[in-house]
Amino acid sequence: MLKLVKPSAKYLQSALTACSEFMSNPSIFQIQSIDEMIQILPDNADRYFYKLYMEENGINLKLNYVSQTIFWLVDDEEYIGTFALRHNLTDYLKEIGGHIAYQIKPSKQKQGYATKGLLLCIGEALKIGLEQVLITCKENNIASYKTMQKAMLKMGGREIEPSITDGQKNHRIWIKTQERHNGTIRPLALAIITKDNKILANKGYDTKKNEWFYRLPGGGIDFCEKAEDTLKREFMEENGIEISVGEKLGIVENIFEFNGKKGHEIALVFRAFLSDKDMLKDKIPLLEPEFEGCFTEFIEINSENKIYPQEALDFIKNN
Ligand SMILES: CC(C)(COP(=O)(O)OP(=O)(O)OC[C@H]1O[C@@H](n2cnc3c(N)ncnc32)[C@H](O)[C@@H]1OP(=O)(O)O)[C@@H](O)C(=O)NCCC(=O)NCCS
């Protein structure tokens, strides 16, 4: 069975064979965690396992390094490849590196292992509280780019502007760690920001119902994040603006269908406020709109505009 495991003596023999394989294929691009494995594991397995333990627990990290967990992808007893999961991002990792780096041993490449392993590693990212992960690769790394795209198609996510490091372009894709409508209930924070009889909302399109709709701005609450902070973070990530958050108006349970799939959310709804400067605008650009022409915009509260979750509007009708 294919699974991700923490490196251990159980798989040592197979990993050592893989080290020889990596070493005899030096032309194949090697990620840093493979270089370290080749350098330490063959002579000193205990030191290698100890180093990984220290890195995972953030002990004596090198300057500008973050905690990371190394997984071995194994098929039954056989080592197949390495996946490095960084627990958070630095400015550098946002440009190149991302949350997850991976390498499959040469004899097992082109058999779907990276794609399957990446999905397993995304599952591990969810366990440490990451709602989405950034994956990057150099522009000429076609295999890795395809692997990232396949994971994005399965899980949902979005590709963002490539970064440029050392004069080279890097593809960057954010991938959700939880399929949005996969049978789990999602905790959300949503903002109610009003101006006259208008409310701030994001425009969306349902490809199955063929209809435009509006959704209150906000997003999924990260593990150990206060819901008020979720709203501030989401506005900064989505629109690049600061907001202030006021009183909690209430809680809404939203069971819905989007693009033919069922969804179930529990949303904490807050009154929130734009800065005076942003309040003067009718439309606030989204940094990465899902469709051309989509904005966060003030729209009329009336029966023609479908605004979701509808129940959240009751909080302002009654106020
Ligand atoms: C990138 C890498 C992990 C892909 O591993 P893999 O197990 O061969 O990938 P998969 O078999 O899951 O294939 C994923 C896709 O890439 C394609 N692919 C794999 N190797 C390819 C190659 N050399 N050239 C073009 N496409 C390739 C596959 O055909 C598949 O696409 P498809 O489904 O459209 O056919 C592997 O090539 C590797 O270890 N490279 C060196 C390390 C590296 O570059 N890591 C990424 C760091 S960002």
Image (cartoon, grey):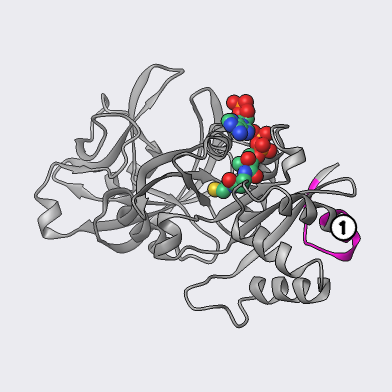
Q: Is residue 14 magenta?
A: yes
Picture coordinates of residue 240 (x, y %)?
26, 54
Residue 148: quadrant of the picture: top right
Q: Which residues are magenta?
A: 3-15
Name the side, left or right, on which 53 lies relative to 79.
left
- State whether residue 318 is above or below residue 50: above
Q: Can residue 186 be seen at all in this image of the molecule?
A: no
Q: Is residue 214 positioned above or below 286 on the image? A: above
- Give the farthest residue toward the bottom: 60
Quick check: 206 above or below 131? above
Q: Residue at horizontal 35%, vertical 33%?
A: 290
Side of 27 where 298 appears, left or right: left
- Does residue 275 belong to the magenta stretch? no
Front residue (pair 303, 39) = 39
Comparing 39 with 83, the one in front is 39
- Residue 147: image x %, image y %? 58, 37
Return the residue nearer the eye: 203 or 289. Answer: 289
Residue, disc 1: 11
Element at badge 1?
helix
Residue 46 position, x and y percent, is 82, 75
Residue at 41% over, 59% down? 230
Q: Residues within 10 Å of mark 1 (few under 14, many from 20)?
A: some
Where ligand 1 lies, by quadrant? top right
Residue plotted at (66% across, 70% down): 56
Give the side of residue 218 with respect to residue 61, left or right.
left
Q: Is residue 164 visible?
A: yes
Residue type marked 1: Tyr
> Residue 223 at what x, y percent from top left?
55, 61
Q: Quadrant of the N terminus?
A: top right
**262 above or below 319?**
above
Q: Is residue 63 left or right of residue 73?
A: left
Q: Residue at x 11, y 46 (%)?
A: 281
